[in-house]
Image: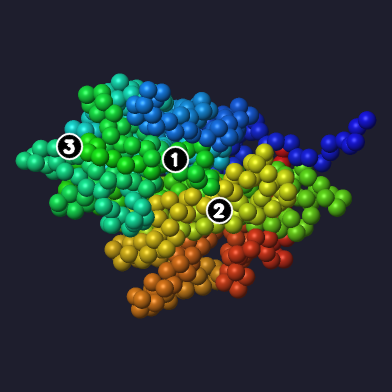
Amino acid sequence: MHTHEIVNQVPDLKDYNLFSTDLALAEGVAREGAGWHACALSAHGAELGSAEVIGLAELANRHTPELRTHDRTGHRIDVVDFHPSWHALLELLRRAGLHALPWMQPGDGAHAARAAGYFMHGQVEAGSLCPTTMTFAAIPVLQQEPALFAQLRERLYAREHDGRDLPIQHKRSILIGMGMTEKQGGSDVRSNASIAMPMDPLNGGRGQPYLLSGHKWFFSAPMCDAHLMLARTENGLSCFFVPRWLPEGARNPILIQRLKDKLGNRSNASSEVEFEEAMGIMVGEEGRGIPTIIEMANHTRLDCVIGSAALMRQALVQAIHHARHRSAFGRHLADQPLMRNVLADLALESEAATMLMLRLAHAFDAPDDPLQRAWKRIVTPAAKFWICKRALEFSGECMEIWGGNGYVETGPMARLYREAPVNSIWEGSGNVMCLDVLRAVEREAQGFALLLAQLEQAAAGHALLAARVDAIRQMLAMPADRREALARRFVQQLVLALQGMLMLAHAPAASADAFLAGRCEADGGRVYGTLGAATVTAQEAILQRAWPAH
């Protein structure tokens, strides 16, 4: 005897195109000069949305990496084993060029094209983005050492994944990781205690081999073929390229002590390592390790913004899909006025995040232009602070829309929720980002003046945006110590003003007005679903734009 029929359960979201169903993304790709890549992005979006790839993501997060420190005879091997799904995901990333596209095909729209692909992959599986980001960000650093880069270039740019654990010269492609953080310092890398001694005391310096001794508290993706590390020489912190294998074929003595048992990002391995006289090549000027990696940090921070915007987009799509199929109290959730308010508010937040990340990526194509440099240097840490913070609350709200079904690991919402905090923490926490914004405003005074002028022009005739720009100017006039205390408030105002400007310029008028009104100082905008009465008639159009009904 059957006890009940299974009804009112939502079908899995699968076999859809992540690009063609995202109007804000497709419009932004064209607007930011990446229209030439639209066909490839559409093909990639269809592949990522397939049931097969969604299944790979689930497998990679269920079967997490395993560390083997020794072989059966007691020899140290320090190997991390991954499920085959992990390598399949890395193959997808590599084939799409997300590890190096702007370096392989530089030009207008290259960074936006890559950002769009990265954004789509991040909606399906986030852990595999970590070694991809680090490899991408390492390339401009390694280009500073022409002799070293010449040996690596072909393998860095290769569009195939080679997961074999072999010396670099025997591989078809390579991945680069990072090892900056030590247990005593965290974000304060100037307190790093690892030391580096030249192999030849009479011939040290840039491009020369050193022996590194010390530890790293977060050593990301330990199976990468090499890592960029910071270590201290007699002349201060320097940057080093440290391969997993030595040129003669022996293992470099980098000992993996344990893998981190992380809240999220579980498909990817993060580790603690000790190294005693591991060989590394100095990259950049001796004693200038931190300036050497600043460019790398800019790229990794942009990827944090893209990755968090991706989590928001996927959580939104899952929430709308659920609400259109799930019934309660006699009608679909999506037909209920309060739920429509919540979903529309979430849709506006997601669209504004998508616009901002694509506009930021576009700025990386023209770093010598003062305005674009201001976007890159000032807005990148600001966006990392705000978008990554919003992703936490956003994913929790979307999980709540699913109710109890969202709280179990067999659905997608739990993984999205667990994934959300990492981007706020990685590459500098919120306070670090906000203080960096203040420093960048002072150092990029010309560019920031152009940025403010751009905002003021957009605010002409729009009272809510004008009020936010006035608040920014008032905080700039404060004494330095008070401005530092209000740094988070300043950055919040700046990002919301920039998002409002982009929405006014590129979103439907009703969407832009609803976004600005929902985030004005009086309404707060911290709880989703508080859009005013004036937006009610526009909410269905907002939802159709966010996720067209099938």
Q: Which residue is mark 1?
A: 259
Q: Nearer the viewer, residue 22 or 406?
A: 406
Neighbour tally class for label 2: few under 14, some 14-19, many 20 plus, Cα within 10 Å: many
Q: Which residue is mark 2?
A: 391
Neighbour tally class for label 3: few under 14, some 14-19, many 20 plus, Cα within 10 Å: many
Q: Amino acid at mark 2?
A: Ala
What residue sits 51% from the left and 62% below the top? 496
User: Can you say which quadrant of the picture contains the C terminus?
Assistant: top right
Residue 276 quadrant: top left
CA distance separating discs 1 and 2: 26 Å
Q: Amino acid at mark 1?
A: Leu
Identify the colour scheme used: rainbow
Q: Are marks 1 and 2 in contact (CB under 8 Å)?
A: no
Q: Nearer the viewer, residue 491 or 66?
A: 66
Q: Are marks 2 and 3 in contact (CB under 8 Å)?
A: no
What residue sits 46% from the left and 44% below the top? 260
Q: Identify the mark nearer the N-term, 3 or 1.
A: 3
CA distance separating discs 2 and 3: 42 Å
Give x and y (percent) for residue 197.
16, 43
Give x and y (percent) for residue 164.
39, 23
User: Can you say which quadrant of the picture contains the N terminus?
Assistant: top right
Q: Which residue is mark 3?
A: 209
Q: Amino acid at mark 3?
A: Pro
Instruction: Give the secondary structure at mark 1.
Output: strand
On screen, residue 425 above or below 519 = above
